[in-house]
Amino acid sequence: MSTPAPNRLATAEIERRLVTYLATQGVMPKQGLAPSDVRIAESGGLDSLGIVQLSMFAGEEFGVELADDDFVAENFETVGSVARLIESRLSG
């Protein structure tokens, strides 16, 4: 069994932190859904300003900087898609 690199966060931990952040912003996950399946864009709580704020949170919380090319709808559909985007920036 391999161990993750010391600076690498597991997707589940990234999702947990995202859910906590989104809850403070009023974008609450629906009960019974796995965090990675929560459709944050459809919840109505994450508009274009919310996406900018979420990207700033990602920078502060995870030390990642998102590129202009990252700001596409697919990357902000679910908590899981945002977590995968952050994880990809953390890994290189």
Image: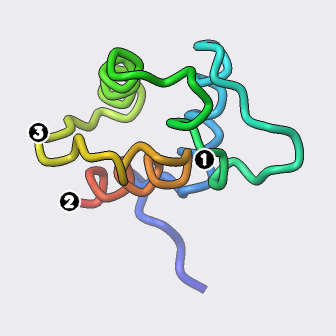
**Residue 56 quadrant:** top left
Residue 47: give x, y in percent of width and height: 42, 22
Residue type at mark 2? Gly
Residue occupied by mark 3: 68
Residue type at mark 1? Glu
> What residue do we see at 71% from left, 26% from top?
28
Check the image and report above or below for 3 versus 60: below
Of the residues under marks 2 and 1, which one precedes in the sequence?
A: 1
Look at the image and tell me in which quarter the N terminus lies. bottom right
Residue occupied by mark 2: 92
Q: On the rendered structure, is 23 left or right of 80?
A: right
Look at the image and tell me in which quarter the C terminus lies. bottom left
The answer to whether mark 3 and mark 1 are in CB contact below 8 A is no
**Residue 16 quadrant:** top right
Q: Nearer the viewer, residue 66 or 72?
A: 72
Which mark, by number, is residue 59? none
Which mark, by number, is residue 13? 1
